Amino acid sequence: MVSASLIHPTAIIDPAAQLDTTVSVGPYAVIGPRVRIGANTSVGAHCVIEGETTIGCDNQIFQFASLGAQPQDKKYAGEPTRLMIGDRNTVREFCTFNTGTAQDRGETTIGNDNWIMAYVHIAHDCILGNQITMANNATLAGHVQVGDWATIGGLTGVLQRMRIGAHAMVGFQAHVNKDVPPFMTVDGNPLAVRNVNLVGLKRRGFSDVRIAAVREMHKNLYRQGLTLEQALQAMDAIKLATPEAAQDVEFMQSFLASATNGITR
């Protein structure tokens, strides 16, 4: 049972929807029959939450958000697809998150502790990790993947199937048409790597040794004229020299080895 004291009388909630008793719902919000919302989540005024949508605990969804609408994909033919949102996310005004498509995994996934500002669009089949910041009007096309702790600047557009690595920083109004390696700062149109995301890494508690290893990987990729294959091989020496950073190096090597869209240069 939903607590009537937390639900505005003008909200329309389908009887089949599953809301924890601690969920609050603002005026004129509409919640569909296949929606599940966890404890202590708040849904603002005029929000529409529909489709096969599951939202975890302690999320704050501001007014006028549209979550769980069918994908903006002409191939979509009404297949049962989903939107999954984790815990402790902040979703600001006028955000639009769509469900997945049958042509991919059938699910759009958003992790935990993300800070998603106004007018952000997250299209079908995207996968977002945790602790991500997306500034106003950032837009993800379908099938995009964003790693933990990444930051995406305002008015940035990300093309279909691109990947943004963990701890990367994408600057204001960027055009992301290639994969963005982890730990890097990129911006512009055409997109270019500017440096290592030093501020972000320091804020997240990276030691000086780990940061030095990331800077060395940056040199391998962007300062020494190496091919991608040569840069990957050169990173093996960084692992041997700095065991403390071995996981960071392996993470970078795995990301680069699996890049099918090319990487931002």
Image (cartoon, rainbow, N blue to C red):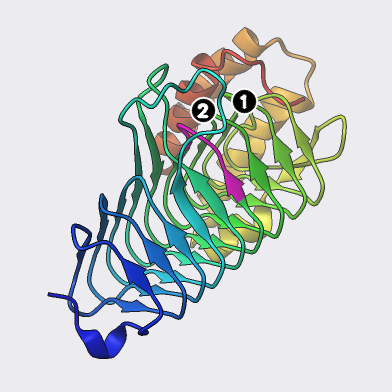
Q: Which mark is residue 199?
A: none
Q: Is residue 216 above or below residue 154?
A: above
Disc 1 + disc 2, Cβ < 8 Å: yes
Q: Residue 55: x percent and y percent? A: 31, 57
Magenta region includes residue 125: yes
Name the quadrant of the C terminus. Answer: top right
The crowding category of the residue bearing disc 1, from other C-alpha atoms within 10 Å (few below 14, some 14 to 19, many at least 20), is some
Q: Is residue 125 above or below residue 111?
A: above
- Is residue 152 visible from the viewing direction of this image? yes
Q: Is residue 82 above or below residue 112?
A: above
Q: Residue at x 51, y 15 (%)?
A: 257
Tag count: 2
- Separation of marks 1 and 2 at Cα, in angstroms: 6 Å
Which three-letter amino acid code belongs to the residue tagged 2? His
Q: Answer left or right for 21 relative to 189.
A: left
Label 1 residue SS: loop
Quarter residue 78 falls in: top left
The crowding category of the residue bearing disc 2, from other C-alpha atoms within 10 Å (few below 14, some 14 to 19, many at least 20), is many
Q: Answer left or right for 3 relative to 210.
A: left
Residue ID for mark 1: 160
Magenta region includes residue 255: no
Report the magenta residues as a range: 121-126
Name the quadrant of the N terminus. Answer: bottom left
Which three-letter amino acid code belongs to the residue tagged 1? Gln
Q: Earlier in the sequence, mark 1 or mark 2?
A: 2
Residue ID for mark 2: 143
Q: Residue 235: x percent and y percent? A: 55, 23
Majority secondary structure of the magenta segment?
Answer: loop
Quarter residue 244 falls in: top left
